[in-house]
Amino acid sequence: MPSSPLAFSARRRLLLAGVAGALTSGFELPFKLPAAAATPPDLGVYDAAAARTLLAVCRTLFPHDALGDAPYMECVRAIDAAAADAGYRARIDAALARLPADFDAADQATRERALSALRDTPVFGALRGAAGKLYRNPAVWPHFDYPGPSLAFGGWVDRKMLDLDWLPAETLQLSEVTPA
Amino acid sequence: MSTRFDLNDDSVVVVIGSGAGGGTLSAALTTAGVNVVCLEAGGQVAIEQDLPTMYGRVKWADTRLSEGDLNPALPVFIAKAVGGTSIVWGGVALRIQPHEFAARTNYGEVAGAALADWPISYADIDPWYTLAEQRLGVTGTHGNPFLPDHNNATLLKLGARELGYEQVSNGHMAINAVDHDGRPACRQFGFCAGGCVIGAKWSSLHAELPKARASGRFELRERAMAVAIEHDDAGRASGVVYIDADGKRQRQRARVVCLAANGIETPRLLLLSASGRFPDGLANGSGLVGHHYMTDLLGRAIAIMPGRVDNYRGTTYSSLVADDMRHDPARGFVGGYLFVPRGIHLPTYVNEPRADGWGAEYAEVMEAYPNMASAALIGEDLPVHDNRITLDGETLDQYGNPVPVIHKRYHDNDRALLAHGLERAADIYRALGATQVFTRASNVAIHNLGTCRMSSDPADGVCNAYGATHEVPNLFVSDGSQFVTSGAAPPTLTIAALALRQADHIVGQLRAGTI
């Protein structure tokens, strides 16, 4: 059981090796995304036009303007990979066919109205699930001030865990009566 | 470490399942000198601080069907791994309360519920709770210090105090505040629900299986899926048939069989073990195997606060608001509930405020992640006769056996309790200025209880007060399936206490030659 800082640094190396492995196997693209990501990359199943629509679907589901297209493209790639299954692809294609032709050029409110029409279909859950993987991508964590695993620095025990300085002082005083 | 027993060795105790019940029982039996073969359906897993990865790695993914109020796609989340669901439990280690052991007496008749008193009293189990708390190192008991405060826990406690709650504490957690039993103190990693990397949280994996192995009397067979319990001509359990890691059918003979496969697989295995002598399932003369399925009532509150919380920091569930654990029918329901904080990490936060949220409005809720506080409600779930586990008539699992069907519908009492508790949870955060609060009941069960309940009268339950089945004296139920009622507390401490008590009973019976 690691209880010394030394033991932790061994674990840290392990962890970093794991993260590096994940980056090379899971996140590295076999091509360079253009800075503006105007052209979706070649995918296994979908052509550029379909990929653009899927990108717009993912951005519509969880729109964070400060995030570039790259993390959303990871979600598109996951959909593309799953679409190797013919049944899955047929459901996605049917959903895309129900979107207006100018879907990816429309504004957020218009796109939300278009997606609402799909809300009661099973494929909507699949699209939401794929787009929701956005938040698993360490590349977006800084935007949400989420630091991720704490193993590398030995956990929060020696760091600040209690800093509710926005609470009124008289409320905070209540916390002095903790263990009961 | 490498102890092996012969398949034809009929002197061993076979324990099915290596989680909180099976692991604790195995450790207690082996250290008392009894030879144990433990069959675990899952394999060894590596623990990482990555919740989505961990859920995928440990989850019991075999097909299950669901009918009723639970999520049809994932009705139940339990683990299939060495160490069982104790790997991913939260660590909230509370006793079932004295009045809850006599629920039928104290609550009276509740229409539509099959309430009963336990065949054991609180006085019977009290010393075993003490042993379990000492063994698990439960904080705030027997001189063990409490875990430290962090923002998410403190907000729950402060909000509760603003509303006048009094039984507010840092909670009783089977997570080490200081080194205990060869396991280190908690580092406040904040990933309790994915498994503890250092074993500061008690689990069978970290605390019990090592004791069993060290005894030299223990063999754990991984990826060994029990598919039938056999009996001899005298109607005594004689062995367990299982599919081994290579897909081969094996038979381990046994002197005693202990079933600790969690509240769904335990009754399923009895039903699958029907024979000419036991046509409705082994030990199912009462017809109650699989019935009275309880999940504990689970709810969640997610609050957006006026300032930062950063609730990923520190132990996920430590601290407790216990006032509402009392039985007070004036609230409009019987039984009680509790609140604990619940840390949430960004990768899983997307499904928390709403399971189906999306669009610009929901993205705003996601953006508020740093200001998010959260609590869980756990409450007493009433036993209902038709809430049960059955075998499906058509679908087979990968081992060729009928898959289980989970029938679960909330009783009106359950709905009233959840509505009351979730409104109180919202009030707690509103008292501190929350700008938005999302509350909902969970439709994924994590506790599976009552499906082979204890009873004094063999017509009213499956096993006796020690977990021995009424009809097969050397066949024991050793997990939460024994529970008569759920109580408001999470089940693990009670499962561990019952396992220690059962081990003591089995050792005595073996010495006396009565089983």
Image (cartoon, coloured by chain):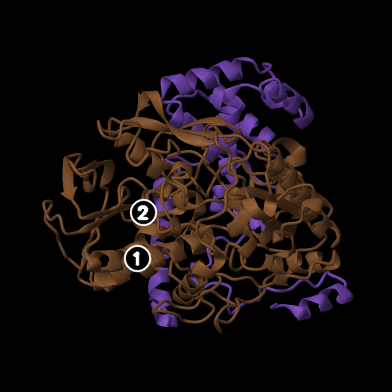
Chain colours: A purple, B brown
Tag 2 secondary structure: loop
Tag 1 secondary structure: helix
Q: Is residue B61 left or right of residue A35?
A: left
> Quick check: do tags 2 and 1 share a chain?
yes
Instruction: Give the residue at x 50% y 23%.
Output: A47
Q: Chain of mark 2?
A: B
Instruction: Give the residue at x 60% y 19%.
Output: A96
Rendering coords of residue B160 (x, y %):
79, 65
Rendering coords of residue A176 (x, y %):
77, 81
Which residue in the protein does label 2 denote?
B468
Q: Earlier in the sequence, mark 2 or mark 1?
A: 2
- Is residue B148 placed above or below A60 in the rendered structure? below
Type of amino acid at the residue the image marks with label 2: Ala
Could one spot residue B19 in this view of the protein? no
Which residue in the protein does label 1 denote?
B505
Instruction: Give the residue at x 49% y 78%.
Output: B185
